[in-house]
Amino acid sequence: MATKDPREPFTRISVQEAKEKLDRGEAVMVDVREPNEYVEVHAKGVRLIPVNTVIGEAKQIRDLAGDKEVLFICKSGQRSALAAEFATAAGITDLPLYNVEGGTTAWVAAGYPTGD
């Protein structure tokens, strides 16, 4: 279930909630892991923008999202939380930001689609 900590600029959601948002066309998902991790396995339809490039790629994230929500995913949920913080610092404050708890590990374990 989605949870919002007032000290964080994002909402934490489960992989199930993330998949539902993607299926409804409400959101885009950004994988913030390193390229070598991404090529091993990634959620289907996700865009790779490594966490250390999020601030510099804020325009790309905004363009990708349009008016949709932005879901950040990594391996387990740590770097994606940091990416949401970086996105906020880079000025993305008008779009809902989400951290996918459990990350790609949970996505794969749930049997959700992977690959391009």
Image: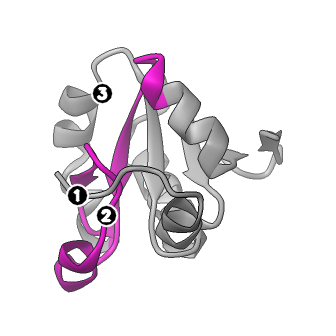
- Queried whether the magenta region covers residue 31, the answer comes back as yes
Q: Residue at x 52, y 38 (%)?
A: 19
- Which residue is disc 3 drawn over? 65
- Which residue is disc 1 drawn over? 115
Q: How many marks?
A: 3
Whichever of labels 1 and 2 marks the residue nearer the N terminus, that label is 2
Q: Residue at x 19, y 57 (%)?
A: 56
Whichever of labels 3 and 1 marks the residue nearer the N terminus, that label is 3
Q: Could you tell me how far apart the alpha carbons at marks 2 and 3 are, in whole angstroms?
A: 19 Å
Q: Horizontal placement of 116 versus 50: left or right?
A: left
User: At numbered mark 3, what does the secondary structure look like: helix, strand or loop?
Assistant: helix
Image colouring? one colour
Task: Give percent across and percent down for residue 20.
Answer: 57, 29
User: At numbered mark 2, what does the secondary structure look like: helix, strand or loop?
Assistant: loop
Against 54, residue 29 (above or below) is above
* Cβ atoms under marks 1 and 2 closer than 8 Å: yes
Q: Could you tell me how far apart the alpha carbons at marks 1 and 2 are, in whole angstroms?
A: 6 Å
Q: Quadrant of residue 92?
A: top left
- Which residue is disc 2 drawn over? 42
Look at the image and tell me whether residue 80 can be seen.
Answer: yes
Work out which quarter of the rendered image holds the N terminus and state it. top right
Viewer-closest of 111 and 58: 111
Region rendered in magenta: 22-51
* Residue 106 marker: none
